[in-house]
Amino acid sequence: LAFAHTEPGARYDLRQVGLPARRSGEAWVLDGDKRMVLPGGQADTLVVSARTAGGDTDEAGITLFLVSRSTPGVTVKAVRTLDNLRAADVHFAGVRVEADALLGREGEAFGMIEEVVDYATALLCAEAVGAIRYANDATLEYLKTRRQFGVPIGSFQALQHRMVEMMISYEQARSMACLACVKVDTAEAAERRHVISAAKIKIADACRHVSQEAVQLHGGMGMTEELKISHTFRRLTMLAQTFGDAEHHLERFAAVDATRS
């Protein structure tokens, strides 16, 4: 199962759904494209968001459909992401689905989509904390074993300071991830949005800081395929961008603040 939602040009805007679903008797016909569907290349069934009413950026008028990959007119192009995850671009050409393929109520899917993406963002935050911890542990071990001028480079005070800053980023990210995981299940919608965006802002910054520092402190070895830290760097880079980067969530956080004040 994979969620086919992102469209060309939509970036992080969950409301931007332009793929039309038009009625054809008792059935629906879908035409359009979805991008970067994770893990669309392996999924047998796609949860597809489509526009049944309103404009391309309206919250109302978005409907979800369950579409089998084997349905005539569905074309799946498998791709790999920067961090080597499997994804797919999916094209729908006159794809006919029956009325029972509709998931939830017609035109009222936006709230469900936002809640699901917030839940997924909380899970990504937790994954990021684990990756950050690994990056810190691997970097600390390297500083203890790599020798220069006859001593471990971890004895240099400037590198110790940088390692401490990485640990601070980890502790802050861990605290925010714990808060996000609690609130995503228990809070009302407005508070959930507020906390999830706050967590993603802090954790996206921590991903950038720790991944770049880890590579820098490893030196040239940090960029080689043989060293796991290079793969962790790519994964942290993608985690910082997935479901909204720090800038997107800062805007969302401010928008929620404005409505609550």
Image (spheres, grey):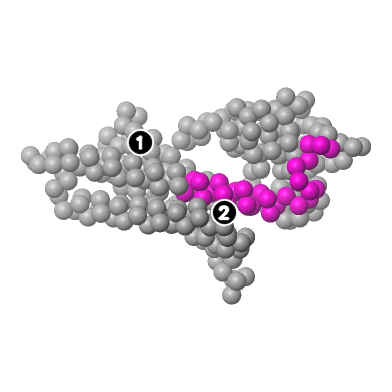
Which quadrant of the figure has residue 34? top right
Dot 2 falls on a residue whose secondary structure is helix
Left or right for 109, reference 227: right
Query: Dots 1 and 2: beta carbons under 8 Å?
Result: no
Which residue is drawn at the image coordinates 70% and 32% (left, top)?
A: 91
Q: Amino acid at mark 2?
A: Asp
Residue 122 magenta-highlighted: yes
Q: Which residue is mark 2?
A: 185
Specify the farthest residue to the bottom. 261
Which residue is drawn at the image coordinates 62% and 52% (left, top)?
A: 115
Dot 1 falls on a residue whose secondary structure is helix
Which residue is drawn at the image coordinates 50% and 52% (left, top)?
A: 181
- On the image, the x and y values in percent for residue 32 come to 74, 38
Q: Is residue 111 visible?
A: yes
Earlier sequence position, callout 1 versus callout 2: 2
Q: Which residue is mark 1?
A: 230
Q: Which mark is residue 261?
A: none
The residues colored magenta run 99-125
Q: Distance between the Cα atoms at labels 1 and 2?
A: 34 Å
**Prevalent SS, magenta region:** helix
- On the image, the x and y values in percent for residue 101 come to 78, 36
- On the image, the x and y values in percent for residue 179 come to 47, 57
Q: Amino acid at mark 1?
A: Ser
Left or right for 89, reference 158: right
